[in-house]
Amino acid sequence: MGGLFSALNSSAGAMDAFQRVLDTIQSNVANASTPGYASQSIPLEALPMNSDGTLPGGVTTGEMQSARDEFAEQNVRQQFSALGTLEQTSQSLSNLQLAFNVSSDSGIPGALNQLFQNFSSWSVTPGDGAAQQAVIDGAQQVAQSFQQAAQTLAQDSSDTGQQIQQTVTQINSLASQLQADNQQVIQGGSNAGLDAQIHATLEQLSEYADITATTQPDGTVTVLLGGQTPLVIGTNQFNISVSFTTPANAPATVAGGAAPARLIDAQGNDITAQVSQGQLAGELNIYNTVLPSLAGNAYQQGDLNLMAQSVADRVNQILTSGNISDGPPPVPGVPLFTYTAGSPTSVARTLAVSSTITPDQLAAINPGPPYASNGTALQLAGLANPQSPADEINGFSYAEFYGNVAAGIGSQAQDASNQLNVQQQTLAQARNLRSQISGVSLNDEAAELVQFQSAYDANSKMVSVLDQLTQATINMLPQ
Amino acid sequence: MPRDNRIAIEPDPAARVRELHAMVREARTRLTAPTVESLEACRSLLEEAVNAIGGLQKSLPSAEPWRDRDLAAALGALRTEIAGVQILLDGAAAFYTGWMRLASSMASGYTADGNPAPSETTPRVLLEV
């Protein structure tokens, strides 16, 4: 009878073991598309048996094992962060590209071109009221174009500032979720579902910023921002915040300029430089570098303001050096443009035609020597094709300077778009590598190691082939 | 039937560069799943592209091909594609390097200077009788 009972027990144990394996397989199938889920497996282990029946044998299940590999997970998260940066940068730059149209028949270049033509027509008939009015109208168009461009940049800056704020809130919210998950892990609730939830949150978080996640011996996950700043350690969460102020060690150098966006950790330290990847890094780059290079901030005037001021100052300078009439006494010219003085970053936004100037106050006469009744009008028309450094910005005509700015934005947008395309494939590659490596046991599967060694070798061989191809293409096309 | 990747004789250099481009793009697509097999296939494709571009260089009518706008655009696109392959290859290399370091340290421990010891990865054959 003892033999029968032990055989029945053994069979029941085996049934139970197989049921657990089947449950695990079912769970794997059901969660095949659950974000963050890694397949689980239960090894079957033989129980000892002997012939006298004291050890009945049979089968039992071992510890449940996860196919997850943290090295591959971190690789996917890194690629996600890089994708986040590029998506943000590409989108922001393409918006800017639309605002800075390089075409000469619209926007700032179109308005400037028209003004120079109006100066030229006026120089032919300096006393003609219609020609004088056309100059005033053209100047108004130029002022409006600069104002519109400045408003677009201000709006972009405001939108990006809000996005930074939202991204920081999102990062804190995800960190809070991870902190709650850690709490559950410590309370003994660790299971495949919770593990999937943690990894899905980590992947989501990595799109916002570059994070490093390490699993501790107690099963909790530690999350660092930029490899240094703690976001979550065990059951503690450390919030980050954003501050739109100039730091004490780098006070503003340009009056009235907007302060940069700075990331602040829970202890009040400036950690902006630590965030180099993720959507947040892209937003910070646009807010602190790209937009200020055009619209200015606390540290620079910005190309748009520089150009607006250069055009306004030069036109005013030429007009005020001329005379409206010979007199006697001669009546000196008056400025055409105005802008808010003392605020270098507000020039484009406040550029306007003087409210007091009338068409007959445009000074066409250059008193000389040599005297010329249309001398200043000719000089103003000549701004289109400058012959003197005074009519240029950093060695470029106004049109060329604008063209360079617009081309710079266009080129950055194109680069970001190209990189985004490749990055999408790099992320796909990281995900494929994760699947490839998933479930490989480093200790037991020497054959798998051989396979990866082969892949590594194949990779190395390709490098030299690619070098040859790159060199051949470079030889055919200059950089 | 083995796939025929040979570049057809084509009078237009820009069209030939575009064919090369397609070949490099295929290599790039394969690199998104860098298994041993796909890496070997990529290598073949790129070696073929190297040979083809060598032949193309010799047959170009002008010493300054970028003066031909169509050809310059095709070469520019090819260069962008090659840069993409380079990035994916670097990604795969970084992954495999990291994985091998990890595998070595787990399989064989560390050397005295703190680096992972080389792992035994000699191929094994299992005979079942």
Image (cartoon, rainbow, N blue to C red):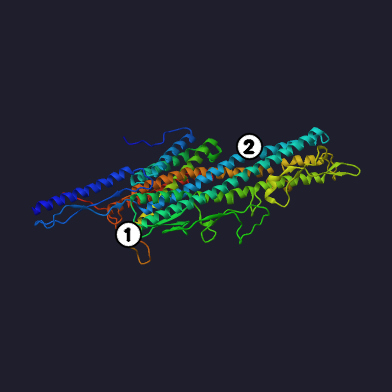
Looking at the rendering, which quadrant does residue A123 occupy? top right
- Identify the secondary structure beneath mark 1: helix
Chain letter of disc 1 in the image:
B
Camera-near label (2 vs 1) is 1
As drawn, is A47 to the left or to the right of B71? left
Q: Residue at x 77, y 42 (%)?
A: A354
Q: Tell me if B128 is positioned left or right of B43 in this view.
A: left
Q: Tag 1: residue type?
A: Met
Q: Quadrant of residue A140?
A: top right
Q: Is residue A327 left or right of residue B18?
A: right
Seen at 38% across and 37% down, the residue is: B5
Classed neighbour count for the residue bearing mark 2: other residues with Cα under 10 Å, few (<14), some (14–19), many (≥20):
few
Identify the amino acid type marked 2. Ser
Q: Which mark is residue B106?
A: 1
Residue lying farthest to the right in this orientation: A328
Report, in whole angstroms, how far the alpha carbon at label 2 lies from the one at label 1: 61 Å
Q: Are marks 2 and 1 in contact (CB under 8 Å)?
A: no
Q: Residue at x 67, y 53 (%)?
A: A256
Q: Secondary structure at mark 2?
A: loop
The residue to which callout 2 is attached is A103
Residue A212 position within the rendered picture, expressed as x and y whole percent measured from the top left: 43, 55
Which of these two is toward me, A73 or A256? A256
